[in-house]
Image: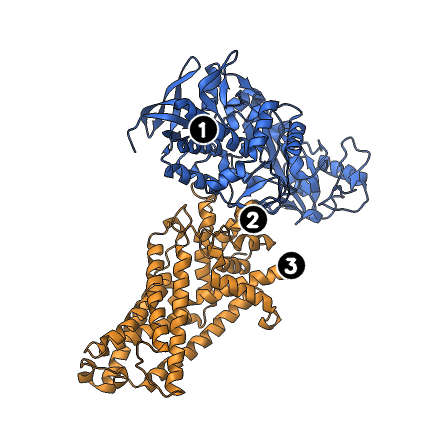
Chain colours: A orange, B blue
Amino acid sequence: MPTNQTTAEAIRVMTICNACRYCEGHCAVFPAMERQTVFTQNNIDFLSNLCHQCGACYQHCQYADPHEFGINVPAVFEQARRESYTQFLWPTFMQPAVLHGGKFMATTLLLAISLFFLAIVGLSGMSKIFAPQVNFYNLMPHSVMAGAFSLSAVMVVVSWWMTLRRYWHSISLPSPGSIRMSTYRVALASALTLKNLDGGHGEGCYESGESPSLWKRRHHHLVLIGFVLCFFATLLGTFYHYSLNVPAPYGWLTLPKILGVTGGIMLLVGCAGLFWIKQTADQRLVSHDNGYGSSLTALLFLTSLTGLGLPIAKGTGALGFLLAVHLGCVLALFLNFAWGKFIHGFFRFIALLADEHQKTKKN
Amino acid sequence: MTSKTHFDVIVLGGGLAGLTAAITAAETGATVCLLEIAPRALRGGNTRHTRNLRPMHASGAFPMEGAYDFDEYLDDLLRVTAGDTNHALAELTIRESNHALTWLQEHGVAFQRPLSGTLHLGRTNAFFLGGGKALVNSLYRFAVQLGVHTIYEATDIALNISGDRFVDLTYQQINNTHRISGKSLVTAAGGFEANLDWLEEAWGPAAKNFLVRGTPYNKGDILRQLLDAGFKQIGDAAQCHAVAIDGRAPAYDGGIVSRVDSVPLGIVVNNEGKRFYDEGQDFWPKRYAIWGRLIAAQTDQIGYAITDAKAEGLFMPTVLPPLKSTTIDDLAKQINIPADSLQKTIGEFNAATVSGSFDHQALDECHTEGLPINKSHWARQIDTPPYSAYPLRPGITFTYLGVAVDDRARVQVEHGNPSENIFAAGEMMAGNILGRGYLAGIGMTIGNVFGRIAGREAARHAN
């Protein structure tokens, strides 16, 4: 039996969709729907996370408002997805981070920036923070930064592990080892290429209205690639620091800097694009999420912006303050990794994996 | 909105036929105004509920799964219509259908491989990606880009026809009356299947129990005005395409999801609990179209498709669950038919089944013997609870009555020449080609073919 209103509505919608099937060619959701013999909380958790919110099925639905059936798959699935993030989140007392994403971001950001500001003041003294600085390790030693973020990273990974294994089991995936390598490969390819945002005809998604557009997919690619570049820049910096004994700051033409700056710019453009797409989206497709979705975009944007600002502020009195803001953004982003919208990527990958697994099992 | 009141071409109706005509005319440089009676969200007439068309094609290139040539197409058409077709127009339609796919693709319509659950249509029919509404959206987008002036919620259209010539028309929009004139008029406003009063003229009170599967806007107003103006009628009002659908479906616009595909897997009884036709005569996609008429002939225009547990999962899922029970008596009570009669029917049916190997995907050997009405295939005893019942009603899809046209889509005067500036396309004239019967996807084919012809000829006349 459905446990709540969203699931009940999702089941009602899927029952009608399964009798129609006109949208079968748009994305993976509808062929997956057809494989289910009955709709339950568990397969709604699966199907809703398989949905990439492209909007094609809504714009093309003969049963959408004002039809009495009032079908709107993207809207109900967005709601259902968010409920699945809440339901499986570990630890459960962090659920308000999903339910009130905007407030969670604002609070954590404020606290994190203050924390780093006070830490710098405590470590280096008030006089130093507003004095022109060239090297930010004078403000906060590398070991403190590395220590704080290593600890955060451990916390992030533990909560991912706990959250995702619960989701994994609930949608009836077998143990990770028993899934074929080729299944992982196909699912990963779908995830990375955002195959399900192509509309089925390659012309893109319909979030902004009746005309397909590839911009959501492109901007998401920019964000993902930018993020990966920044991640590698950080790893490489750590390697330079510990193994090569070359501490930051690095020159403009060093590899960590090139990766970081390129990634940062991609993130800025991509996040701004995604934000713009969300603002101009067909309002019938979006449900109010209390800033949950936008908080990840905002944090990635702010982190990149402040990160790119650091080398520019080098040698000025702004460096200390900017460093506190940047580190605060990064810490708030880490909290988002664990309990914010960031986990959508993992949920979606697991759903794609389950989809591919069901397909191969059937053949 | 512009205040322009004179156009080269005025198109009435914004389904596939009207859109095709409007785009074709606009592409020749003509100024075009398209009047759609529905609000924007419900535009597109019955095209909104469609999903494929049937083009003649030489090869199995995407999205088709094999060739479908002229002769086979014509054979199919002659078979289903039992010859009730205008041969010249039928041949023209088939020849021109060869270009339908390309035309639609060039105008932004995407296709896909056949949908699941569409038996045997992969070779002959091309499926619209996302269904008919996706096609409608694409074509409107294209029409607007071409500068077609599109007016929604244009109701109470009154044609001013002088002799056999269109002069101008008035329409209502949000309580205001507007008058526009055009050199040519393309009528593509659909049939009258949503006009229960008109249906009642042909069907009697039974029509009140019909469900309309498609748009509630096809009232036949334009068709009626053309007939009243003396243009030649084709087909008769009692001919309509009606299928057996879930009796609990919405009165209008239920579309594809109102289907119930369990009929061949069990028996169908009327409200006296008696069977009335061979449920296993052929595959359901080939038979559902006769069942609307069969149900319409029963008392109160209702039937009940009854199956047992063995049939579960073998047919397309339905929106509403069936009425269910572990006993026949209780099931009979739920559907309000005499229990003893239903018991007797099922008892006699079970006793008459001949054992054989069951295969619901083939014309199998399971049948009955010795009944007044035997079941030819898929006849298995109804003996495994729970038992299910779906109420069935006639669901009307389209009407055949229309106006006669020539090969230039000009409407014909009863005794005389065709009109020089009034053209028809789509369901309003489909009866010229499909006088009776049904061939999946032929309606959309006629809509596109005659839409192109009407658009071209209307623009030519305007220049």
**Quarter holding residue A242:** bottom left
Which SS class for mark 3?
Answer: helix
Q: On what subunit does the disc labeled 2 rest? A: A
Residue positioned most to the top:
B415
CB under 8 Å between callouts 1 and 3? no
Instruction: Give me the C-alpha separation between circle 2 and circle 1.
Output: 38 Å
Looking at the rendered structure, the kind of residue marked 2 is Asn
Checking the image for residue B455, the label placed there is: 1
- Mark 2 surroundings within 10 Å by alpha-carbon count, few (fewer than 14), some (14 through 19), many (20 or more): many
Which SS class for mark 1?
Answer: helix
CB under 8 Å between callouts 2 and 3? no
Checking the image for residue A362, the label placed there is: 3
Mark 2 vs mark 1, foreground winner is 1
Looking at the rendered structure, the kind of residue marked 3 is Lys
Q: Position of residue B253 (x, y in %)?
A: 50, 36
> Quick check: A86 above or below B118?
below
- Mark 1 surroundings within 10 Å by alpha-carbon count, few (fewer than 14), some (14 through 19), many (20 or more): many
| Residue A91 visible (yes or no) | yes
| Residue B133 visible (yes or no) | no
Mark 2 vs mark 3, foreground winner is 3
Instruction: Give me the C-alpha separation between circle 1 and circle 3.
Output: 49 Å
Q: Position of residue B346 (x, y in %)?
A: 74, 39
Residue wearing tag 2:
A18
- Give the number of marks: 3
Looking at the rendered structure, the kind of residue marked 1 is Gly
